[in-house]
Image (tube, grey):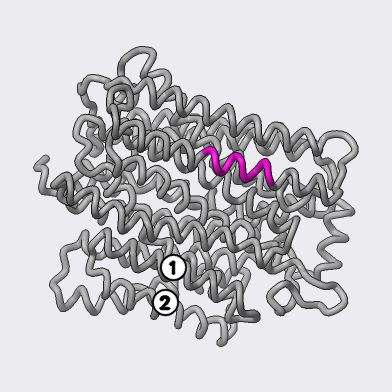
């Protein structure tokens, strides 16, 4: 295969796994508020779904790195990207099948069962970690490195199709096609008319699809193994720093878990202590990145890929990007549900919704990511300049139409809702025209728009606030491939190791949503979105800083 020619048949097979990641991840947006109601837990506890799922990405990538250090061979390079993806799919299948015995016989209010659900999701996430470690650099390696971000956008578009239909399918599976009032739904859950049996069936089906995908990859002749005999580069200082960070995070969350054992205390002091401990865990991640950056600049020996500042800064960028993308969607359900029962209005001044009614908004949020990634993938097909300009305008609204059609099985959107989101899409299109396919400029523009959207959501109410928060999906949509491509630019033999470090930082999806959940418990659900403003703020800083770093190194990007 020529380095300049994209292996389209291999890329077509590869993008199937991206669909699975999106389907499961976005489904958590419906599953989280359902768990909160079903298991009688608070907002922080409900966000542990994300902690288990995305924390597994970090643990999985860290274990790969530690084992590779021990045997002095990069496991993924030795296996080849293809085999790594197959093993990851099999591991995810195991986690999906475990969901059945984990929830067998569970009834409403049995909080202990919730933690078995988290274990099953953790195993699914471990498999996803291995898949992502192989799949992202695999997509970049299937053609010209300069267009690697566009192939990731194409794969991301398929991923986002999964995120769009995932919430609708899961809502349909759990609640059926009927629409109940909040009181009716609460009564059905309390009387065990709505149970976890449907969730068991869903995950058995997903597990079978994982097995089918693993077989497809294993027997496919279209997919090259893409093994590498590049010698493993030791990074003992990086390894030790990550182990210390892991112990701090485990210690922080372990302490918080202990405060929920037995007779739960919900005093203001306990809540504030939990919030402080969560911020310590968050600060530990930022401090670890800062220590790596400053230490490696003085003496690069022992830091491996972390000696490259673009990677270290990119690790924190991936952390904040995944964190903000996940936390906006995961706390959205509570934002739409929480409010005064007497007034019948939620935190935004709109009608209070219940678990069965929020699916369309979660689908719309994650659909925003699909819209941006479909647009980002246009370049893969090499259209003429004139056609490309037309497609930049048409494709987003075609994707919006797909979102509306996907929701018709259960939901419909009002004219006002279509109008509001249509305006948000127009802003995104304007951003694409300004960015002109340049990764750094794209990050600058969309980080700024993300901050602006969150601030509008914080300081307004009604549909303006709701769709400002929903616009976060549109502005997050294009960031992953930009950050990933910029972070591994110029890494050479450290590319695989750098990819593993970046996958570890999906940890942001495990840390930031629980932090926002506890902010919501202590303050309010709407004000908790200040955490999203801070995340977009760092991404804006990263866009400026990484350009300076790469220009100084003379690296093309």
* Residue at image mark 1: 474
Instruction: Identify which residue is drawn at 42% across, 35% down.
Output: 291
The residue nearer to you, when weighing 528 against 391, is 528
* Residue 183 visible in the picture: yes
Q: Judge from the rendering whether residue 543 lies leftward or rightward of residue 212; answer left or right.
A: left
395 w.r.t. 80: above or below: below
282 w.r.t. 83: above or below: below
Image location of residue 375, percent across then percent down: 31, 67
Neighbor class of circle 1 (other Cα within 10 Å; few <14, some 14-19, many 20+) is many
* Residue at image mark 2: 425
**Is residue 230 located in the magenta-colored stretch of the structure?**
no
Neighbor class of circle 2 (other Cα within 10 Å; few <14, some 14-19, many 20+) is many
* Residue 219 visible in the picture: no
Instruction: Identify which residue is drawn at 36% across, 37% down.
Output: 293
The residue nearer to you, when weighing 83 against 294, is 294
Q: Secondary structure at mark 2?
A: helix
Image location of residue 242, percent across then percent down: 47, 29
**Is residue 277 located in the magenta-colored stretch of the structure?**
yes
Q: Judge from the rendering whether residue 347 lies leftward or rightward of residue 470; answer left or right.
A: right
Quarter of the picture containing the N terminus is top left
Instruction: Identify which residue is drawn at 88% across, 34% down.
Output: 262
- Contact between marks 2 and 1 (CB within 8 A): the answer is yes
Distance of mark 2 from mark 1, alpha carbons? 7 Å
Instruction: Give the prevailing secondary structure in the magenta stretch.
Output: helix
The residue nearer to you, when weighing 221 against 50, is 50
Magenta span of residues: 276-284
Image location of residue 474, percent across then percent down: 44, 67
Image location of residue 11, percent across then percent down: 26, 47
Q: Secondary structure at mark 1?
A: helix
Q: Judge from the rendering whether residue 27 lies leftward or rightward of residue 452; answer left or right.
A: right
């Amino acid at each position: 295969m020529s380095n300049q020619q994209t292996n389209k048949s291999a890329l077509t097979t590869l993008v199937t796994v991206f669909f699975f990641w999106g389907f499961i991840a976005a489904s958590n947006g419906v599953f989280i508020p359902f768990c909160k109601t079903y298991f009688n837990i608070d907002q922080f506890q409900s966000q542990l779904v994300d902690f288990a799922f995305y924390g597994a990405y970090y643990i999985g990538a860290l274990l790969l790195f530690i084992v590779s250090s021990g045997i002095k061979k990069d496991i993924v390079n030795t296996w080849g990207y293809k085999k790594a993806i197959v093993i990851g799919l099999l591991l995810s299948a195991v986690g999906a099948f475990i969901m059945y015995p984990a929830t067998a016989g569970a009834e409403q209010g049995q909080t202990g069962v919730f933690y078995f659900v988290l274990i099953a999701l953790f195993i699914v996430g471990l498999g996803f970690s291995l898949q992502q470690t192989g799949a992202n650099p695999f997509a970049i390696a299937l053609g010209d490195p300069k267009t690697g971000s566009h192939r990731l956008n194409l794969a991301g578009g398929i991923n986002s199709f999964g995120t769009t239909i995932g919430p609708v399918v899961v809502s349909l599976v759990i609640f059926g096609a009927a629409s109940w009032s909040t009181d009716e739904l609460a009564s059905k859950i309390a009387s065990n008319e709505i149970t976890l049996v449907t969730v068991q069936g869903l995950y058995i089906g997903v597990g079978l699809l994982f097995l089918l995908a693993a077989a497809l990859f294993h027997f496919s002749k279209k997919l090259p193994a893409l093994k590498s005999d590049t010698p493993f580069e030791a990074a003992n200082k990086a390894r030790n720093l990550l182990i210390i960070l892991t112990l701090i995070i485990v210690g922080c969350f372990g302490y918080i878990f202990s405060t929920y054992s037995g007779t739960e205390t919900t005093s203001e002091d306990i809540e504030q202590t939990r919030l402080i401990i969560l911020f310590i865990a968050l600060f530990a991640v930022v401090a670890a990145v800062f220590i790596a950056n400053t230490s490696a600049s003085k003496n690069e020996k022992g830091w491996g890929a972390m000696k490259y500042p673009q990677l270290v800064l990119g690790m924190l960028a991936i952390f904040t990007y995944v964190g903000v993308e996940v936390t906006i969607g995961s706390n959205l359900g509570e934002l739409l549900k929480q409010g005064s029962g007497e007034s019948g209005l939620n935190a935004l001044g709109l009608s209070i919704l219940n678990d069965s009614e929020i699916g369309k908004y979660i689908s719309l949020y994650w659909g925003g990511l699909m819209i941006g990634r479909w647009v980002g993938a246009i370049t893969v097909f090499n259209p003429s300049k004139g056609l490309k300009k037309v497609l930049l305008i048409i494709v987003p609204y075609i994707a919006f139409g797909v979102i509306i059609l996907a929701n018709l099985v259960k939901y419909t959107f009002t004219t006002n809702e279509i109008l509001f989101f249509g305006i948000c899409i127009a802003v995104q299109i304007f951003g694409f025209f300004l960015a002109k396919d340049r990764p750094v400029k794209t990050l600058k523009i969309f980080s700024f728009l993300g901050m602006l959207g969150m601030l509008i959501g914080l300081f307004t109410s009604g549909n303006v606030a709701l769709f400002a928060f929903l616009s976060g999906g549109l502005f997050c949509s294009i960031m992953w491939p930009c950050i990933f491509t910029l972070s591994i630019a110029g890494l050479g033999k450290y590319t695989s190791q750098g990819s593993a470090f970046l996958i570890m930082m999906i940890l942001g999806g495990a840390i930031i949503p629980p932090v926002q959940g506890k902010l919501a418990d202590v303050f309010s659900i709407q004000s908790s979105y200040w955490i999203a403003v801070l995340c977009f703020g760092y991404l804006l800083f990263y866009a400026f800083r990484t350009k300076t770093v790469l220009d100084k190194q003379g690296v093309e990007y």
